[in-house]
Image (tube, rainbow, N blue to C red):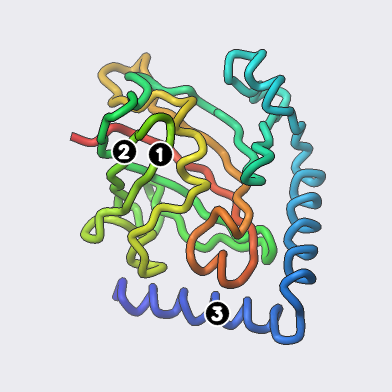
């Protein structure tokens, strides 16, 4: 059943992107993506702050003001909803991280994947192995436990998913006062999963990050 659903997802995604891209140049697709991101920011009343302001605020974003920091080098926008419990991933450390997320195609305003609790794929908890090498984070999905891998056929973790890692703590909830890290991300196609990259469309993610055993 899951295999059929993933196949259907792939077909629908390809049909949507193909219909959009049939006569468009890459430059035109990029322009459409940028316009979609700007519209999403405007409609959701997002306040964009610079990396300098983000640093001055102690690498936090004001959720009450709906702040997102824009990383100029990647084009990723990030809002830290919860900083998380536990510790930052240290230099030289290799850690297992468990994620639940919602993925929305901003261009088509449609939910593509969702494995949060009580949703269709909630039994598939995304597991990725992350390495911090002098502040550069690399990661791969566990092929046996990853909705992203099953949906898109790639173990590569989108670069956009790694953008929050220098700023959030990765731990496990040990009591009701602690909360695992949660972020919201606007991810352009260049930092996204393989279908987004090929189809030139941006995605919006809500993701939680929890340390695996």
Q: Identify the residue at horizontal 30%, vertical 23% (top origin).
A: 173
Residue 25 is left or right of residue 131, and the answer is right
Q: Are marks 1 and 2 in contact (CB under 8 Å)?
A: yes
Give the mark, 3 or 1, whose residue is nearer the N terminus: 3
Which residue position holds label 2? 131
Disc 2 vs disc 3: which is toward the camera?
A: 2
Residue 28 position in % (x across, y down)? 79, 71
Q: Identify the residue at horizontal 60%, vertical 55% (top origin).
A: 203
Inter-mark Cα distance, 1 to 2: 6 Å
Query: Callout 3: helix, strand or loop?
Result: helix
Q: Quadrant of residue 15?
A: bottom right
Disc 3 vs disc 1: which is toward the camera?
A: 1
Which residue position holds label 1? 137
Q: How many marks?
A: 3
Query: Callout 1: helix, strand or loop?
Result: strand
Which residue position holds label 3? 14
Q: Quadrant of residue 100?
A: top left
């Amino acid at each position: 059943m899951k295999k059929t659903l993933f196949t259907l997802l792939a077909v629908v995604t390809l049909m949507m992107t193909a219909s959009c891209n049939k006569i468009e140049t890459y430059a035109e697709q990029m322009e459409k993506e940028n316009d979609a991101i700007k519209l999403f920011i405007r409609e959701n009343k997002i306040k964009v702050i610079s990396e300098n302001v983000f640093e001055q605020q102690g690498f936090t974003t004001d959720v009450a003001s709906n702040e997102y920091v824009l990383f100029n080098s990647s084009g990723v926008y990030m809002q830290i909803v919860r900083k998380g419990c536990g510790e930052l991933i240290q230099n030289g450390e290799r850690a297992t991280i468990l994620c639940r997320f919602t993925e929305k195609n901003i261009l088509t305003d449609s939910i593509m994947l969702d494995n949060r609790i009580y949703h269709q794929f909630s039994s598939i908890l995304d597991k990725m192995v992350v390495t911090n090498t002098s502040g550069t984070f690399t990661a791969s999905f566990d092929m046996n436990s990853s909705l992203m891998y099953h949906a898109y056929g790639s173990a590569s973790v989108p670069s956009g998913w790694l953008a929050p890692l220098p700023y959030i703590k990765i731990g496990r909830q040990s009591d009701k006062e602690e909360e695992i890290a949660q972020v919201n991300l606007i991810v352009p196609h260049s930092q996204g999963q393989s279908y987004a990259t090929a189809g030139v469309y941006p995605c919006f993610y809500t993701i939680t990050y929890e340390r695996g055993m």
